[in-house]
Structure formats: C-alpha cells, structure tokens
Image: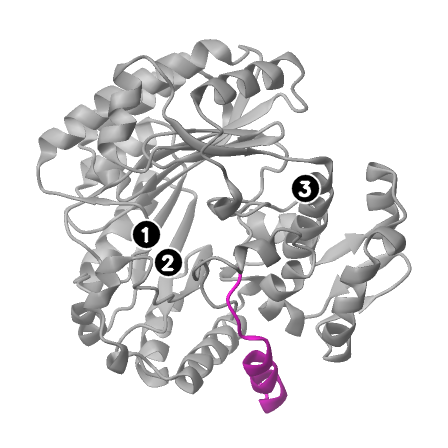
C-alpha cells in the first residue's frame, strides 16, 4: 500500500458508526417498550415482506474479562447464574414463538456473546432443541456460533453440531504472549489449533477467526508472525478489527495503558500490512474488517450483489426478519428495531412478569428506509444502482440526494469512488473508507455528534 493511501487514511480518520444498522443504535428510544414490540410483531406477521426469518441468541457470560472487549458481558465463575439465565431465555423463546407464523422458515441462527460456550454441552443441547421445537428451522439454515477455545471441550463442539450448527467463529486476537498478557487473554496457539482440528473433524463447514490490530505492544513484525500462523490454519473467513480504545464508554478499558498502544502511524502500518499480507495469501478484502476466500459464500454474495449487513456484521441472508433473545440483544423486523434490557436484573425481571424485555427501539420512517437502502448497498455491494433505487422508492436520486452527492465530490476526487448518472461505485481504495462514505448519507449523524463520543475511529 503506497504513501498516497496512507495520506488518505490520515485525512479521513474520524469517529463514525459501523452501520450494522441504520439508523445506528444511539438513535433508539426508550419510549419503544414491550407494548410497542408486541404491536410491531403483530403488524409484521400480518403482512410479512419475507417468509424467511433469522434468530439471534445472546449469551453474555464470560469467565474472565478481556480488557479490549466492547461487548455487553457479565464476568462470573458462578455457573448458577447461567442456569437461571437459561431458564429465562427459554421462557422468552416460548413467549415469542406462538406469535410467529408456522409457515415462516428460519434460515439463519447465530449465538453470540459474551461466550456462548459458557453453556455446558447439556445446556447447548437443551437450548438448541427448544429453538427447533418452537420454530420451523430450514434444513439449509446457516447456523453460526462464537466459541472461546479456553475451557472448551470436544463435547461442547459435538453438542453444537448435534444442534445443527455448521459455522464456527473463534476469537484469537493475537498469538503474541506479550500482547495476550497485556489484554488479559491468555490463549495458547496449540490450544487454538486443537479446537480448530476438532471443529473440522466434527464437520463444521466454515471457520472464521477474529483478530484485532492496534492492541498494546503490537508491532508490524509481531503481528505479521501471527498472520503467518493464521494463513497456515487457512480459515474460510477472517475478521480483523481495529481496536477501539474507548474507556469513557467501556470502563474496564482503563486497564489498558495508552502508552502501551501503537502510535497512530504504527497502527496504520499494521492495517496496511494486514491487507497486503492477506491479499497475497489469496483472501479477498470484502470491506470494513472482513476477508474471505474467493469461493466463500461471503465473497460470492458480494460478487452477486446479495450481501447483507446486520448486527453480526456481513451476512448472506438478506431480507429476513431477525428476532433476538437474551440480555441486550437487538432484533430488526419489518420497519422496527427492538433492543432488550442491558442488565441481567432488568431482563430477568421483565421475563418473570410475563412481559417482553424490550428496553428501547425505533420505528423507521420512509426516509430511513431509503437511506438504509443506499448505505447498505454501498457497504455491501460497493455499488449503488441509481435507476433501481429510483424505481424502488419513487424518487429522482440526483435531486433527492443533491446535498449528499456534493459531499461525495471530494471523495471522488481522492479516488475513493466514482459518481455517474446511473451508479455510484466504490474503488478498491474506497473499501478502506466505507464508513466515511456511508456517513455522507446519514441524516441522524449531526444530532448524534452533539452527544458525548459514541463511536470508534472509521479507519
């Protein structure tokens, strides 16, 4: 990657949403509660735009605190808390399932966390069987789960396969012991490889590994050594996240000392080296943080312009309604977003009372739907078909988005995209700046910028 790109990264580095949703989650309102959630379910089920649905289950528990973590977690070694939580989770599933039409087919399931494999193998089998009892799960459903190799047994993976999971995602972050100690994530390479070998023996068809650049004590040489090991493992997909040091949002990150972090220039060098190394190894840079083999479904979906984006990142299942279970989980169906309470006590209290645990939500306007279409097409397809957009929404694109197109001119001058009469197309270099490009179309961004810092750096 040449010096011109380095200068562009410095020019466009700023804080901005990741656009796993539009509007972004800070726009959600606490005035959207359980009653509004039930109404939205009923309205969606009366006239579903798509018969396919996705299910997300959030398991918040972890044994130990990873100092870099930005997820909603509960750190505990008290396994009785998991027993209690699972009871409420099953009750929430039982509450929602009768409201969903039997003809609606589940085409995607994802368990995230926290650590879904904090569940015992028996609990995995119980939760998995309850979902299949209550919902019509397609035989071709894409079922993925996040696992932590630490304290994992082969029976955990066997239970996941028996439950129907076919994709697995492992957190690695970095193999360097010094980096691992600095972020309180001690995970031996041999342990990671053993779990990967188990997963392949058991028939998981796709492996994703998560890495993070910008962690304490990382250098270009040390992270390159990790990447060489990762390439040898040969996962189908990789997510290489930019570490967001946001101690004002995630208090535990105060345990990471700023003086131990790579400088801005070093962090940019880490990013550039990562892209060059993985590209040379045959991985396609999908955009944002994601890489995939050319024959992986993610890469195929991008080529065929069917790629989608949701709260779990890039997805191949576009258009399905997502219903979510568990503390802090976010669902998106019809024209609404709905998020559950963010603490165990509030979540479990609501479910105990026979109420949904909805804490906040948002009902999209017609303008939101149009802007979401534009943003997601650019972020997923790297291409916006203007006539298609005009036909779908009954607008003249160049008139409706005159101000936004004006903002894009400087990005076009920098070679990040091209603007034509019939299309906006993002260049290879522009893949690095997808968030910056999307921000040009975000009508909610000015109001969010008046609040305290909410987002990580875009590059």
Is residue 408 something that shows in the picture? Answer: yes
Tell me which label, 3 or 1, sits earlier in the chain. Answer: 1
* Marks 2 and 3 close (CB-CB < 8 Å): no
Q: Tell me the mark number nearer the camera, choosing from 2 and 3.
A: 3
Residue 13 lies within the magenta run? yes
- For the N terminus, give its image quadrant: bottom right
Secondary structure at numbered mark 3: helix
Residue situated in front as seen by the camera: 105 or 236: 105
Measured as percent of width and height from the top left, residue 154 is found at 20, 40
Q: Residue at x 43, y 16 (%)?
A: 96
Residue underneath mark 3: 368
Displayed quadrant of residue 114: top left
Q: Is residue 125 visible?
A: no
Q: Are marks 1 and 2 in contact (CB under 8 Å)?
A: yes
In this view of the protein, which residue sits in the foreground, 216 or 204? 216
Disc 3 from disc 1: Cα separation: 34 Å
Q: Find residue 210 and name its label.
A: 2
Choose between 223 and 4: the one closer to the eye.
4
Stretch of the chain drawn in magenta: 1-16
Tell me the residue that label 1 is attached to: 170
């Amino acid at each position: 990657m040449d010096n011109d790109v380095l200068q562009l990264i410095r020019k466009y580095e700023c804080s901005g949403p990741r656009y796993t949703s539009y509007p972004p989650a800070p726009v959600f309102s606490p005035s959207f509660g359980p009653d509004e959630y039930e109404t939205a379910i009923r309205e969606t089920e009366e006239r579903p735009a798509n018969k396919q649905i996705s299910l997300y289950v959030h398991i918040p528990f972890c044994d130990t605190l990873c100092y870099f973590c930005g997820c909603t977690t509960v750190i505990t070694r008290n396994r009785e808390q998991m027993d209690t939580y699972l009871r409420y989770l099953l009750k929430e599933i039982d509450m929602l399932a009768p409201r969903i039409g039997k003809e609606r087919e589940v085409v995607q399931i994802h368990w995230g966390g926290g650590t879904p494999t904090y569940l015992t193998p028996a609990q995995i089998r119980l939760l998995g069987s309850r979902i299949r009892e209550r919902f019509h799960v397609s035989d071709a459903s894409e079922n993925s789960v996040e696992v932590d190799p630490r304290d994992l047994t082969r029976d955990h993976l066997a239970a996941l396969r028996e439950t129907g999971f076919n994709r697995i995602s492992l957190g690695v972050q970095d193999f360097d012991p010094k980096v691992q100690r600095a972020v309180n994530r001690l995970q031996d390479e041999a342990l990671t490889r053993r779990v990967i070998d188990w997963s392949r023996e058991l028939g998981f068809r796709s492996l994703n590994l998560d890495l993070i650049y910008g962690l304490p004590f990382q250098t270009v040489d040390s992270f390159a050594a990790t990447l060489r090991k990762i390439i040898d493992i040969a996962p189908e997909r990789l997510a290489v996240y930019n570490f967001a040091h946001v101690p004002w949002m995630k208090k535990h990150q105060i345990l990471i000392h700023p003086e131990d972090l790579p400088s801005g220039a070093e962090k940019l060098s880490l990013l550039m080296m990562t892209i060059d190394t993985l590209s040379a190894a045959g991985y396609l840079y999908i955009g944002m943080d994601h890489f995939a083999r050319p024959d992986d479904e993610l890469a195929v979906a991008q080529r065929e312009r069917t790629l989608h984006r949701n709260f779990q990142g890039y997805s191949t299942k576009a258009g399905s309604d997502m219903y979510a279970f568990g503390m802090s989980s976010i669902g998106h169906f019809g024209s609404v977003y709905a998020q559950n309470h963010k603490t165990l006590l509030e979540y479990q209290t609501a479910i105990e009372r026979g109420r949904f645990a909805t804490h906040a939500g948002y009902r999209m306007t017609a303008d939101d739907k149009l802007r979401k279409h534009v943003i997601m097409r650019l972020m997923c397809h790297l291409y916006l078909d203007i006539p298609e957009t005009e036909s779908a929404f009954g607008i003249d694109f160049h008139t409706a988005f005159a101000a936004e197109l004006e903002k894009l001119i400087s990005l076009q001058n920098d070679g990040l995209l091209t603007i034509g009469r019939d299309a906006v197309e993002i260049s290879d270099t522009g893949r690095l700046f997808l968030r910056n490009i999307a921000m040009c179309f975000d009508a909610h961004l000015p109001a969010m910028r008046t609040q305290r810092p909410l987002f990580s750096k875009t590059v």
